[in-house]
Amino acid sequence: MKQIIINLSRIGKQGTGMAIYSKQVVHCLKAHFKNLSVVSPDKKYQDDVLNLIRVPSYLSITSRLSKIRPILWLLYAYFFFPKKRGHILSTTHHTIPLVRKQIVTIHDLRPFFYPDNYLQKFYFRYLLPRAVKKIDGILTVSQSTKELLIKHYQIEPERIQVVHNCVNVTRFKPIDNAKKINEEPYLLMVGATWKHKNAHEMLAMNKYWQNRYNLKILAGNGKYKQQLIELSQRYGLTDKVEFIDYLTENELISLYQRAVALVYPSIMEGFGIPPIEAMACRVPVIVSDIPVFRENYGNAPIYVTLNNHDSWRIAFEQLTNKEYIEERLILGQQQSQKYSKERMCNELFDGITKIWPEIKELL
């Protein structure tokens, strides 16, 4: 009997945006389809589905760049992936060779414009555009990314379905301000593992915040994190900046709740989960003024124009304006309520049944 196979073989470490999205996809589809398989290196999915197909952990994405891992993945996908068992839904952009009945998820086109290496550039510029024309459809996480896919990959709009990320607002929620009184005030950056997160610009703008706040940067180990450490030393910020590795969800929530603000000045994103999580925790957010953030966050954040000193200066001045910030906090909590699991599940089901009308027979 045909089934849906969810390909999670490359999602990487738990706690990342891609891993969170993938976990929700499994939970959403499990509510609709009984005959569901998951391909993953993570055995925890054994509790979610009847059939877990384990793959080697070295296929997963990590914060350390590798030229060998993508080649190993292609070999595995070509020779060993269970491609004949049904419809394949990948929660990442990695296609399975010679399979038409598949949907991939392209979270963003950042590597098309700002690749981490030549191999990634080649894949997003030449291999992926050809591969997605040979499969049934694409999921993406924002209208902004959909428009980029249409423009740069020349894909028909109806073949791309938008499925937004979700945030659990029963977990990400405010705490009493009284619990922050005796704490040293700090700004927070989350997910600064890659260069496009633009934490280096935040460090360069230190004269606008260092006399008032400390800075905590959550980043996975890798080349970019080391560059940030060296930058903080060069700017004389060693005593002002703390680098933190991946945390449990409870630890991350606590970090949000006690922050003065989340700073998220990405050069490019597909969605941007951390600002929504911070808004749900009733924390102000400072973000870059890019189209996808305008789409997803509305008027809730303080927006900065990248590489503009006046814009950064004004942003940190606004952070001290209690009346202005209170307005942002109200808007932020309202905005975070829009990204519910129910909405994501509905968009996912609608999206894949538009691409694959025949899978309604598997309900």
Image (tube, helix red, strand yellow):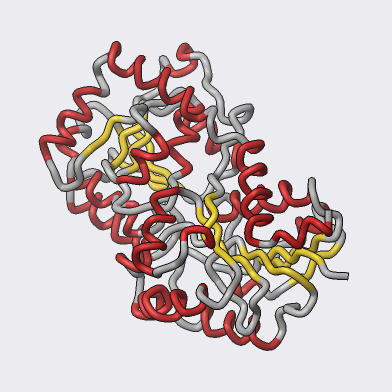
Which of these two is toward me, 153 or 128? 153
Q: Which residue in the rendered view is the most extreme toward the left? A: 310
The answer to which quarter of the image holds residue 3 is bottom right
The answer to which quarter of the image holds residue 210 is top left
Vertical relation: 25 (above or below) 85: above
Taking the image as shown, residue 360 lies to the left or right of residue 235, namely: right
x and y, in percent, of residue 44 in the image: 76, 56
Vertical relation: 82 (above or below) 360: below
Taking the image as shown, residue 239 lies to the left or right of residue 172, namely: left
The residue lying at 68 percent from left, 49 percent from top is 349
Q: Quadrant of the N terminus?
A: bottom right
x and y, in percent, of residue 95 in the image: 57, 74
The residue lying at 76 percent from left, 64 percent from top is 4
x and y, in percent, of residue 15 in the image: 57, 50
The answer to which quarter of the image holds residue 311 is top left
x and y, in percent, of residue 188 in the image: 38, 37
Vertical relation: 50 (above or below) 99: above
The residue lying at 22 percent from left, 49 percent from top is 201
The residue lying at 50 percent from left, 62 percent from top is 106
Which of these two is toward me, 283 or 5? 5
Taking the image as shown, residue 29 lies to the left or right of residue 196, namely: right
Count of number-bearing discs: 0
